[in-house]
């Protein structure tokens, strides 16, 4: 049958700043049906498009989605889950908790796929104690550009090139994930309100002995003092939970988030609103006590479309890590933002413990800061250029899965194992079939 | 590839010595160290710089049928272009029926060859599904004037083709912009008597750079010429002749 509808669809990252026309496929069998012209643009695997920029986009080319790879097999004796790459973190949490397990590393949202989590080598609130996502994966199945599946274990160079490799080494179809045995999916949470950046850093360091999960929310607006709230957590025991009858910690198979209507056209996150929002957050009562695992790990998941708050032009998340535990660099960042009058709506600070095992894994020991800027913010480009430069001078780097602004030279200077990665890329994908808008922007193939 | 702030990374100027073209590039938003390719005759000997960008100068003669597409094709195989400016322009002398050969050259450079290049570029951008093209047309394309109707005819042809491409490329991710400058002080117009609303090449470039960020795909440089040319195009010939 002749179809008059264009096979191309619009695809966007979570920040909605980059939008590309590509052909979306669910499996490899459909690939031969694609024209040569489109194939000349290569393909990129994709999951739930929770990366912020253009990592999962491929303008003019193919996008192979993992949503049909849904197998979940929990092997309780070994404590591992054998999962398809299209399973989301939320779905794995649900399946695992039924057997008394949970994944050791989960991000701020449950709506990312395991394939996406591995390709970005993501981290969570447990980073300083448990490392990164790929540290808990023992084996992956990777499909190459000819459709042939290969199995790679965690000691192989192919594994290291794929962890954090942004989908550019092939399509991950299956992963073996080590799970953590937990008594009950409930967290004992402690929140501490802090007045300054210095206090925040020392508080984060102090709580980490007792709490494996830590994160801080920081106010980057108004006076830029670095005030905020430190959140720490640990698994609660069954005994602790038993004393508190009214706690609803049960997992729903499908959570039903709220959708805010009429969003998406205008930017609600104007400077004034950002200030009000930050101020409210700072003054909200701090909580200490039990909280369900999901609420603690994925606080933003209760609203499905909050990214539309920034309107048509979208927003940029700029997340960096700096290999120092001193406060100097972070103080400087506050100063730069204050000078340019740039405020961030939601800002998260965290301490990283160990580095990532992939060549392009983002984490290195130090502080990581993630900031959300509306794309239309004045002077943003200038400020980010300065930040990039200072980061490079101090051995820091920007997170590729959040990135949509890096340039080629900056990338080279930030990722010191880029050459090793490129060598593996040439070996695993000599024809450079796997490409994305990000790989074009950063000349990664 | 464009970044999140819609800054250009790879830019191509065909007609690399065009002052309006270069001034346009000096005013568009580019990433640090953007790659700018300038294609023009003996361009290597020219000293051209654009702040913050890497400049690559390639000798290119649009009338050379072997090179015309080949050079551009090779470049486009290498990388995606976010912006292509087609700024080939040759005014020639006053049209004169006895200088048919020269008329032919005006038509070839401004229309035949440019059209071939434009169609090629448009097709390549359509495959990559993103990118902008800016075509430097002219107000001369709106209504014939005794002094430059051959040039006007060629520009009218190119302008028409470009508007056709705009329709064809709707929803393809590619955007085609047509700028219709009036009299711009430049090498090309040196020695001519300035027409009303004449502007400098710097100003024209600034306006073109602004133009390609807007939703209006056909724009006049300066904008006031839209009204002037509207009036000119509806005036009866009798009156127009008298005004001339
Ligand atoms: C609200 C929110 C909170 C977040 N919190 C965190 C956090 O706390 N920590 C953190 O590290 N990250 C966080 N992220 C980022 C997110 O975890 C990553 O961007 C993740 O990669 C998104 O997964 P996805 O399934 O949506 O993949 P996509 O966005 O679709 O793709 C991301 C990358 O993974 C590749 N990829 C996807 N599937 C496959 C596959 N099957 N095979 C090979 N490559 C593949 C793509 O090619 C692309 O390069 C957050 C994002 C959001 C929106």
Image (tube, coloured by chain):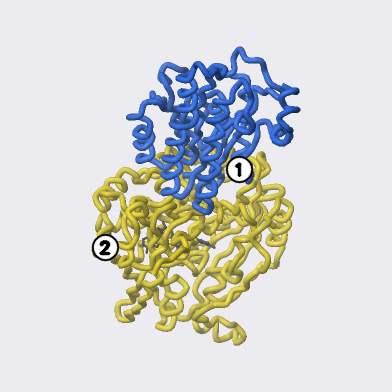
Chain colours: A yellow, B blue
Quadrant where the N terminus of chain A sits is bottom left
Asked whether the beta carbons under mark 1 and mark 2 sit within 8 Å of each other, the answer is no
Q: In front: mark 1 or mark 2? A: 1
- Distance between the Cα atoms at labels 1 and 2? 43 Å
Residue under the point 70% across and 52% down: A270
Number of marks in the rendered image:
2
Specify whether residue A245 is in view: yes
Q: Quadrant of ligand 1?
A: bottom left
For disc 2, the marked residue is A147
Q: Position of residue B109 (x, y in %)?
A: 46, 27
The chain containing the residue under callout 1 comes to B
For disc 1, the marked residue is B217
Q: Vertical placement of A394 versus B36: above or below?
A: below
Q: Nearer the viewer, residue B220 or A257?
A: B220
* Disc 2 secondary structure class: loop
Residue B202: numbered disc: none
Q: Nearer the viewer, residue B142 or B219?
A: B142
* Disc 1 secondary structure class: loop
Q: Position of residue B155 (x, y in %)?
A: 55, 31
**Taking A381 as reference, is A51 left or right?**
left
Q: Vertical placement of A362 versus A87: above or below?
A: above
Specify whether residue A438 is in view: no
The chain containing the residue under callout 2 comes to A
């Amino acid at each position: 049958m002749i179809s008059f509808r264009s096979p191309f669809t619009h695809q966007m990252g979570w920040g909605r700043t980059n939008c590309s026309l590509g052909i979306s496929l669910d499996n490899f069998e459909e690939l031969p049906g694609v024209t040569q012209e489109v194939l000349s643009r290569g393909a990129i695997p994709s999951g739930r498009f929770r990366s912020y920029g253009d990592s999962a986009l491929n303008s003019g080319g193919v996008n192979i989605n993992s949503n049909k790879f849904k197998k979940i097999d929990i092997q309780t004796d070994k404590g591992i889950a054998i999962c398809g790459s299209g399973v989301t973190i939320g779905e794995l949490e649900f399946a695992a908790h039924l057997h008394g397990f949970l994944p050791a590393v989960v991000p701020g949202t449950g709506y990312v796929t395991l394939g996406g989590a591995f390709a970005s080598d993501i981290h969570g609130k447990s980073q300083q104690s448990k490392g990164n996502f790929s540290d808990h994966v023992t084996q992956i199945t990777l499909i190459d550009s000819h459709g042939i599946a290969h199995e790679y274990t965690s000691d192989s160079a192919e594994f290291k090139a794929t962890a954090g490799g942004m989908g550019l080494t092939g399509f991950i179809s299956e992963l073996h994930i080590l799970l953590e045995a937990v008594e009950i999916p409930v967290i004992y949470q402690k929140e501490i309100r802090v007045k300054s950046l210095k206090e925040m850093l020392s508080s984060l360091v102090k709580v980490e002995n007792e709490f494996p999960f830590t994160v801080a929310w920081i106010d980057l607006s108004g006076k830029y003092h670095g005030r905020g709230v430190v959140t720490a957590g640990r698994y609660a025991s069954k005994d602790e939970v038993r004393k508190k009858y009214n706690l609803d910690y049960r997992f729903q198979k499908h959570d039903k988030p709220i959708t805010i209507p009429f969003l998406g056209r205008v930017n609600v996150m104007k400077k004034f609103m950002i200030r009000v929002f930050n101020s409210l957050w700072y003054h909200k009562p701090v909580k200490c006590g039990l909280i369900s695992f999901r609420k603690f790990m994925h606080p933003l998941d209760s609203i499905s479309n909050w990214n539309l708050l920034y309107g048509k032009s979208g927003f940029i998340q700029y997340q960096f890590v700096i290999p120092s535990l001193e406060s100097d660099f972070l103080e400087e960042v506050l100063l730069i933002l204050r000078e340019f009058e740039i405020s961030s709506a939601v800002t998260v600070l965290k301490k990283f413990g160990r580095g990532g095992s992939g060549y392009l894994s983002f984490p290195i020991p130090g502080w990581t800061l993630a900031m959300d800027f509306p794309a239309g913010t004045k002077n943003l480009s200038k400020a980010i250029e300065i930040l990039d430069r200072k980061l490079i001078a101090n051995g820091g780097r920007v997170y590729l899965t959040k990135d949509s602004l890096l340039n080629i030279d900056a990338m080279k200077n930030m990722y010191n194992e880029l050459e090793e990665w490129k060598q593996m890329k040439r070996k695993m994908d000599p024809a450079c079939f796997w490409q994305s808008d990000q790989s074009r922007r950063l000349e990664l193939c | 590839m464009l970044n999140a702030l819609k800054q250009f990374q790879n830019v191509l100027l065909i007609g690399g010595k065009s002052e309006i073209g270069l001034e346009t590039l000096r005013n568009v938003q580019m990433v640090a160290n953007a790659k700018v390719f300038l294609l023009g005759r003996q361009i290597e000997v020219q000293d051209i710089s654009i702040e913050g960008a890497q400049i690559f100068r390639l000798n290119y003669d649009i009338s050379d049928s072997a090179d015309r597409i080949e050079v551009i094709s090779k470049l486009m195989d290498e990388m995606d272009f976010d912006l292509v400016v087609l700024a080939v322009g040759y005014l020639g002398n006053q049209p004169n029926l006895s200088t048919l050969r020269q008329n032919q050259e005006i038509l070839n450079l401004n229309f035949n060859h440019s059209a071939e290049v434009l169609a090629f570029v448009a097709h390549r951008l359509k495959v990559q599904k993103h990118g902008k093209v800016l075509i430097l047309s002219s107000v001369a394309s709106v209504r014939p004037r005794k002094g430059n109707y051959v040039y006007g005819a060629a520009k009218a042809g190119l302008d028409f083709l470009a508007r056709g491409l705009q329709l064809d490329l709707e929803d393809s991710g590619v955007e085609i912009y047509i700028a219709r400058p009036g009299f711009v002080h430049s090498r090309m117009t040196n020695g001519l008597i300035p027409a009303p609303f004449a502007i400098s090449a710097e100003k024209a470039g600034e306006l073109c750079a602004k133009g390609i960020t807007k939703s209006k795909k056909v724009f006049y440089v300066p904008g006031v010429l839209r009204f002037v040319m509207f009036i000119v195009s509806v005036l009866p010939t009798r009156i127009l002749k008298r005004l001339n």
